[in-house]
């Protein structure tokens, strides 16, 4: 039916009703066609419609974008040259710097997606789907004169540990090196903000259709303590979140104190 759901990362988080609504289709007709399909080998026509791995379908429903993962938005000239060479080789429509500190190559033909990833020498980035998509990092004390904490080292370590981790809903994390909050931690699922006395950890923030400011979980943490607490938050969310439920909605359902008591130890509370 031309929906291109096969292999699409977003399809894994949709209901059939949601897919019908997004694609402007009659739900009952879609159900009838699904229920009438017999099992068997995939046809050549269907295989040609399969969504390429590691790609995001564009508005024209004909071309795709790929989003090489650039941890914290920090890269080097060789990586930039590879991205430019791939975009030029496969006649990409555009190169777009994303809000998640990555560089998207936009407008690739489906048959070119796999070759483009191979030329980049990268594993496909986790740009969509129910997983930890990005860790947004400000320059912190590494580069910024206003930095009060090392957001870069902490953010890169979180990214190294958890980027692409499968979760009940999509997850975004931000780390800022001071209270100017250039990486916008208050509207991320987990927001970590540097202060003169250490890091403040917030949970449950998001933008989107139903914006929510993050709740302060704990303050004055050292980087190693932050890493441990983030590990615990993600473990708890993985075990207790409902499918497609952002962590903020989980908090609304179970209460902040339930999360706090589950992920913070007595020693954490004493130090706060």
Image (cartoon, helix red, strand yellow):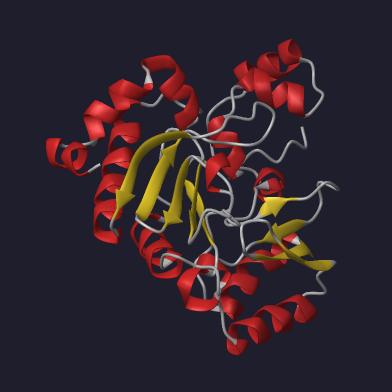
Indicate left or right for 263 with 45 as reference: left
Whole-percent x, y for residue 228 in the image: 24, 50
Decide: is 100 above or below 214. Answer: below
The foreground one among 184 and 84 is 184
Vertical position of residue 217 compared to residue 58: above or below: above
Q: Residue drawn at (64%, 43%), measured in percent from left and top?
A: 43
Looking at the picture, how far across and down is residue 220, in whole percent? 32, 49
Quarter-of-image position of residue 75: bottom right
Q: Residue at x 52, y 73 (%)?
A: 122
**Quarter of the image where one finds residue 24:** top right
Quadrant of the rendering where the N terminus is positioned: top right
Q: Nearer the viewer, residue 14 or 136?
A: 136
Tell me where residue 81 appears, x and y as whole percent.
Answer: 67, 86
Q: Quadrant of the C terminus?
A: top left
Residue 166 appears in view? no
Quadrant location of residue 256? top left
Residue 272 vs residue 251: left or right? left
Q: Name the residue furthest front.
A: 196
Question: How many numbered marks does the figure carry?
Answer: 0
Asked whether 270 or 185 is in front, the reply is: 270
Q: In the image, residue 194 lies at what x, y percent? A: 44, 56
Residue found at the far top of this picture = 28
Q: Residue shown at 37%/53% (left/top)?
A: 199
Rendered position, 78 above or below 198: below
């Amino acid at each position: 039916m031309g929906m291109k759901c096969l292999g699409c990362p977003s399809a894994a988080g949709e209901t059939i009703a949601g897919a019908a609504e997004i694609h402007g289709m009659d739900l009952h007709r879609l159900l009838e066609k699904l229920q009438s399909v017999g099992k068997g080998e995939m046809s050549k026509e269907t295989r040609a419609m399969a969504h390429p791995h590691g790609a995001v379908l564009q508005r024209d429903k004909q071309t795709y974008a790929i989003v090489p993962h650039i941890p914290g938005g920090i890269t080097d000239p060789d990586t930039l040259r590879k991205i430019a060479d791939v975009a030029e080789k496969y006649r990409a429509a555009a190169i777009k710097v994303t809000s998640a500190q990555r560089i998207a190559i936009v407008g690739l033909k489906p048959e070119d997606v796999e070759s483009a990833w191979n030329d980049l020498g990268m594993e496909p980035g986790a740009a969509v789907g129910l997983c930890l998509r990005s860790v947004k990092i400000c320059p912190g004390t590494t580069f910024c004169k206003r930095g009060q904490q090392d957001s870069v080292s902490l953010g890169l370590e979180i990214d190294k540990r958890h980027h692409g981790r499968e979760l009940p809903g999509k997850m975004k994390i931000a780390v800022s090196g001071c209270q100017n909050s250039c990486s916008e931690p208050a509207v991320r699922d987990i927001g970590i903000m540097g202060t003169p006395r250490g890091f403040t950890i917030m949970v449950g923030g998001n933008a989107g259709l139903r914006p929510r400011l993050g709740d302060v979980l704990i303050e004055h943490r050292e980087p190693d303590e932050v890493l441990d607490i983030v590990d615990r938050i993600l473990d708890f969310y993985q075990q207790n979140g409902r499918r497609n439920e952002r962590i903020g909605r989980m908090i609304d359902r179970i209460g902040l104190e339930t999360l706090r008591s589950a992920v913070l130890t007595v020693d954490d509370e004493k130090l706060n």
